[in-house]
Image: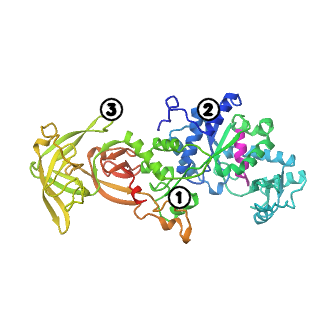
Amino acid sequence: MSASPDSSTTPARNDFIRQIVREDLASGKHDAIRTRFPPEPNGYLHIGHAKAICLDFGLAQEFGGRCNLRLDDTNPAKEDPEYVRAIQDDVQWLGFEWNALRHASDYFEVFYLAAEKLIRQGDAYVDDLTADEVREYRGTLTEAGRPSPFRDRSVEENLDLFRRMRAGEFADGARTLRAKIDMASGNINLRDPALYRIKHVEHQNTGNAWPIYPMYDYAHSLSDAIEGITHSLCTLEFEDHRPLYDWCVEKVDLANSPELLAPLLAKGLPNEASRPRQIEFSRLNFNYLVMSKRKLLAMVNDGLVDGWDDPRMPTLQGIRRRGYTPGALRLMVDRVGISKQNSLLDISILEGALREDLDASAQRRMGVIDPLKVVITNLDEAHEESLTFPNHPKDESAGTRAVPFSRELWIEREDFEEVPPKGFKRLIPGGEVRLRGAGIFRCDEVIKDGERVVEIRGTLDPESRPGMAGADRKIKGTIHWVSARHAVPAEIRLYDRLFTVADPDNDEGGKSYRDYLNPESRRTVTGYVEPAAATATPESSFQFERTGYFVADRYDHTSQRPVFNRSVTLRDTWAAKA
């Protein structure tokens, strides 16, 4: 598992959330902070969630507090244990451990008792309006809503109906439990929002025990209160929901209602009830991506990508398979920072963080993606030797490796030009180039099949070999290679951005995101790699010298059949296209 950043060596970060935490700790309002990461298990987490994970867990770690992982499993029709497993895997992959693993369903009995309390207080009622009628009565941004004709039911009638809802007497959608707040409020979220709806759906944790399920705002606020969360961090779209969040917390008042928390004792859960504070921050949005769960699901179901962990997908499972590292994501989150302003960030920020992380950590290997044969005619056909290469040019502790060298080599096809463009510094007919770590090679003969070059033949300057007097002779170009005799054929998947435009969600001109899918987002070729690359374990990242950063595929790679995914090019190849 990747290690989390060491707060003792990391410079103190400053943003409005950390300032609030520091003030709360300094004032004695809290003796320790408690946060939570509360995803709904209705899909795979994506890059946007990485910011929330790093903030929720990182903040708790930074200030000596604790963070829970809580699965908001209140909508069982859309949730799946597969997503639960993936969420836990993603959090741990990013380098974090939760204080406790909780589920909203752990608190269903508490939610129910709290709802009865609201009814007894006159703060909630059972409504018979249909969903369409509720929308009609709610009003608009410029018109106040109208009270439901069922709003003034007696406490006794509401309790009776709600208990019968709980007993499963009514059909889906027949009734809802609604908060009684203010149908004229300028905040539509406060116009008697639903707290419970009827759904006869089996739940992954509670089975068929509950025919009614709490709504998100209600369950989320009370879950935070139950767990003693001090700072409830969420994205800006929940800012208008904060008054409802506070209303639920204050009206139920769990901290002073021990009778409501009795079900926790039966489950062996601690009573940590408190009054949390919701704080909003901006979402993480990148161009050249689509992060709508609905659209991602459609791409998976329609075969536009190869599943949720397709390396072109923005899911954490996908970018992990692409070769993104926890360190790169944490670096990206630090650079983006925390603000109250939503914005569309350039994907180059994410790609740049990966390049920086891999430049420091990824060992170097040689691999040829589009091979062209080179024959060194002044070496014996049986010639074979072992050259020593550093595993990392900036890190001596990474050690060295032996790279086999022989008479026949593979080089990149783009490293040879019969008619070179201006400024070309690699191999040309009659020209010389340095073979990385092996010496200077001169092209004497070009062999073609029709118009296609199939082989280069030439000589290696013996005085330019490693350790010889001419090894430092000035030469303009240096190219990489692999020994043809020792090279291992590898499947190399060349991944690129999934969309051709920066804003694929722009529906102007009647087009949809599907119209902007990049046909070159994945190309698969057969190349050759040196033996030390082929024997790598899955998820090992390398810089293929002069080519890019690659990772041994998480699932398909073996030493007998190597499979490498391109994580990112050495330089931003899209900048010139802009």
Q: Is residue 113 left or right of residue 502?
A: right
Determine the main secondary structure of the stretch shown in magenta: helix
Coordinates of residue 311 in the picture (x, y in percent) = 44, 54
Q: Is residue 421 left or right of residue 132?
A: left
Please report the bounds of the magenta region as a residue range: 210-226
> Which quadrant of the structure image shows residue 149?
bottom right
Give the crowd class for mark 2: few <14, some 14-19, many >=20 residues within 10 Å: some
Q: Nearer the viewer, residue 92 or 516?
A: 516
Can residue 422 be seen here? The reply is yes
In the drawing, what numbered circle is on residue 65? 2
In the drawing, what numbered circle is on residue 397? 3
In the drawing, what numbered circle is on residue 70? none
Identify residue type, mark 3. Answer: Ser
Can residue 101 be seen here? The reply is no
Identify residue type, mark 1. Answer: Val
From this view, report whether residue 149 is shown above or below residue 470.
below
Sequence-first tag of 1 and 3: 1
Point out the image quarter for the C terminus: bottom left
Identify residue type, mark 2. Answer: Gly
Sequence-first tag of 2 and 3: 2
